[in-house]
Image (cartoon, rainbow, N blue to C red):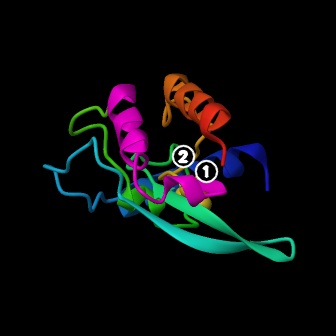
Amino acid sequence: MDSKNVTQLRTKLMRLARSLRVCVIPENADLEKPQSWRDDEVLRGDHLVKRRRLVLLTPKCSSASCLMCPLPNEAWDNSRRVISAAQIIKQFDSCFGHSTDESRQMVTIYTNGNFFADNEIPPLVRQHIYEYNRFHAG
Ligand code: SF4
């Protein structure tokens, strides 16, 4: 396949991906609340550890053509109104300060795409999360 065909294929895939990415999050969603958080236990090595599992509501995955998962549809669409770093930080903070905080040994954070992509998760948010975990590691 020559480079022109590769470019055409990429363009088609990008159009297909965009047509499949339809946001299912209500327009009036509270952008300061995570999609969910819960405590559970996961196997680490040969023993169970107590985990807090967070799912933050974040902008959709910015990959142009990936079709592998439904996360972009379960993400916030910034074309409606832009979610701010402060709102995502509030989501994260709201998952702590509970009675079971002391017993957790691990935190798992899910987003609606790539945690390390600046156009999805502003660096300020990552910095806040890193600082939080440095001072509150269980
Ligand atoms: S989150 Fe990952 S797997 Fe899902 S569409 Fe984006 S790049 Fe693909």
Q: Horizontal placement of 117 versus 27: left or right?
A: right
Q: Quadrant of residue 52?
A: bottom right
Q: Where is residue 106 in the image (x, y as percent from the top left)?
A: 65, 56
| Numbered disc total | 2
Q: Where is residue 58 in the image (x, y as percent from the top left)?
A: 41, 45
Compared to residue 90, the image places residue 10 above or below, namely: below
Look at the image and give the residue range highlighted in magenta.
85-108
Helix, strand or loop at mark 1: helix
Q: Residue 103, can we see it? A: yes
Q: In which quarter of the image is the N terminus?
A: bottom right
Q: Residue at x 45, y 56 (%)?
A: 55
Q: Nearer the viewer, mark 2 or mark 1?
A: 2
Q: Give 14 or 63, whichever is nearer the viewer.
A: 63
Q: In which quarter of the image is residue 83?
A: top left
Quadrant hosting ligand 1: bottom right
Q: Name the residue under label 2.
A: 64
Compared to residue 99, the image places residue 43 above or below, namely: below
Callout 2 touching callout 1 (CB < 8 Å)? yes
Q: Residue 66, can we see it? A: no
Give the spatial CA distance, label 2 vs label 1: 9 Å
Q: Which residue is drawn at 65% across and 45% down?
A: 7
User: In the drawing, what numbered circle is on residue 10?
Assistant: 1
Q: Horizontal placement of 33 versus 135: left or right?
A: left
| Residue, far top | 124
User: In the drawing, what numbered circle is on residue 73?
Assistant: none
Q: Give 18 or 125, whichever is nearer the viewer.
A: 125
Dot 2 or dot 1, earlier in sequence: 1
Check disc 2 and give the amino acid type.
Ala
